[in-house]
Image: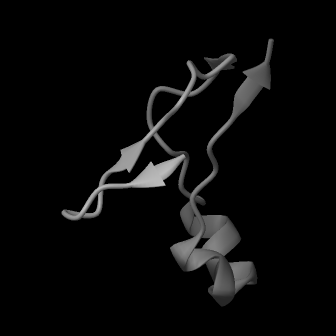
Amino acid sequence: MELHPDGRLKTLHEARVNVLTSKPISPGANEIAENPRARSAKLRAAEKL
């Protein structure tokens, strides 16, 4: 990977992953109440091909 001057990443090959979640999954209100540090968590999932 290379970094463009404007901050974008240039990939040298195609990614070989299958994205399982279209958007990041955030914790629910119950999880945040039990664990305040989870408030900023974002879960993303991908399957390596």
In front: 25, or 34? Answer: 25
The quarter of the displayed image where residue 4 is located: bottom left
Q: Residue at x 62, y 43 (%)?
A: 44
**Colour scheme in use:** one colour
In front: 30, or 9? Answer: 9
Q: Is residue 17 left or right of residue 4?
A: right
Residue most extreme to the right: 48
Give percent across and percent down for residue 31.
69, 68
The quarter of the displayed image where residue 6 is located: bottom left
Q: Residue at x 80, y 11 (%)?
A: 49
Give percent across and percent down for residue 25.
55, 46
Give percent across and percent down for residue 37.
66, 87
Residue 49, compared with residue 32, is above or below; it is: above
Residue 20, compared with residue 49, is above or below; it is: below
In front: 20, or 7? Answer: 7
Q: Residue at x 57, y 23 (%)?
A: 13
The quarter of the displayed image where residue 16 is located: top right
In front: 35, or 41? Answer: 41
Q: Residue at x 70, y 29 (%)?
A: 46
Q: How many marks?
A: 0
